[in-house]
């Protein structure tokens, strides 16, 4: 800004453990969403390296980054971002189409994912016909449908009541156990810290604390 440099992130050094739930914790403005966007190849860092599956995402071109996001990553946003004119089933199938999932296997995979999040009976409903918690569960089903290696969830429980938010996190833990998912989630909700395998606490763009559960 003007002659001043503002560092959104400073000195970040972390590893995301496979088949675990990693939480990025911090207040608004702490840098956690910026960090998630960089890890998820949505934004480029101005310096440093982001290594994923032996690919340096910070040096890769947009085409390669698009390919990685499409094939190996899933995203769950606070705003849900479902297509309002598509049913729950169609929203999940859409990601399979763009990821190149085999056509003859799509129906079974969509139904399995919606069943995993407890929405088998609601798959023909449009998003406006679903509750906030149900919409978020459709978004989770969509994120896992193409079997990504890692799922990024940015404040997925922020707009939900406590009980519904805990249900969403329970789904994440179930996905780790039964689907082999790796999940990175941002939150500032202290009630969710105990369910994480690792918590990175951020403040002013820096990691100020690391909590390894069970250690």
Image (cartoon, helix red, strand yellow):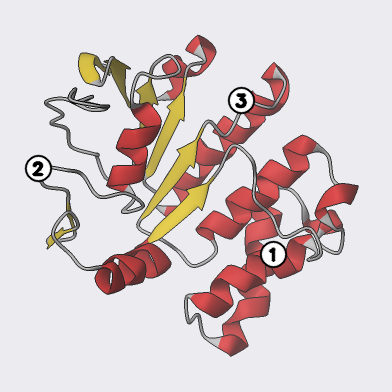
Image: 30 above or below 22 = above
Mark 3 falls on what kind of element? loop
Q: Is residue 173 visible?
A: yes
User: x and y percent of residue 11 in the render?
Assistant: 11, 26
Badge 2: few (under 14), some or many (20 or more) residues near its Cα, within 10 Å? few
Q: What's the CA distance linking mark 2 and mark 3?
A: 30 Å
Mark identifier at residue 91: 1
Q: What's the CA distance linking mark 1 and mark 2?
A: 36 Å
Proximity of marks 2 and 3: CB atoms separated by less than 8 Å: no
Mark identifier at residue 158: 3
Q: Quadrant of the C terminus?
A: top left
Q: Residue drawn at (55%, 64%), measured in percent from left and top?
A: 145
- Pick the residue in front: 30 or 80: 30
Q: Is residue 213 visible?
A: no
Mark 1 falls on what kind of element? helix
Q: Nearer the viewer, mark 1 or mark 2?
A: 2
> Which numbered disc flags the more N-terminal residue, 2 or 3?
2
> Which numbered disc flags the more N-terminal residue, 3 or 1?
1
Q: What's the CA distance linking mark 3 and mark 1?
A: 22 Å
User: x and y percent of residue 80 in the render?
Assistant: 65, 45
User: x and y percent of residue 171 in the render?
Assistant: 58, 39
Q: Residue drawn at (20%, 44%), measured in percent from left and top?
A: 45
Q: Nearer the viewer, mark 2 or mark 3?
A: 2
- The residue at which mark 2 appears reads as 48
Q: Residue drawn at (27%, 45%), measured in percent from left and top?
A: 18
């Amino acid at each position: 800004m003007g002659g001043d440099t503002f560092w959104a992130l400073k000195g970040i050094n972390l590893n995301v453990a496979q088949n675990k739930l990693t939480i990025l914790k911090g207040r608004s403005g702490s840098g956690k969403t910026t960090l998630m966007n960089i890890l998820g190849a949505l934004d480029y860092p101005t310096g440093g390296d982001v290594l994923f599956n032996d690919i340096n995402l910070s040096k890769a071109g947009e085409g390669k980054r698009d390919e990685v996001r499409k094939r190996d990553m899933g995203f769950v946003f606070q705003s849900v971002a479902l297509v309002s004119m598509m049913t729950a089933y169609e929203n999940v199938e859409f990601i399979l189409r763009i990821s190149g999932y085999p056509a003859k296997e799509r129906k079974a995979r969509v139904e399995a994912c919606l069943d995993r999040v407890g929405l088998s009976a609601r798959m023909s409903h449009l998003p406006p016909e679903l509750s906030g918690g149900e919409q978020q569960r459709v978004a989770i089903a969509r994120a896992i449908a193409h079997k990504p290696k890692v799922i990024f969830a940015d404040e997925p429980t922020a707009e939900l009541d406590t009980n519904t938010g805990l249900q969403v996190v329970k789904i994440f833990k179930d996905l780790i156990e039964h689907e082999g998912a790796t999940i990175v989630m941002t939150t500032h909700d202290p009630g969710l810290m105990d369910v994480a395998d690792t918590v990175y606490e951020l403040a002013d763009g820096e990691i100020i604390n690391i909590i390894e559960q069970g250690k």
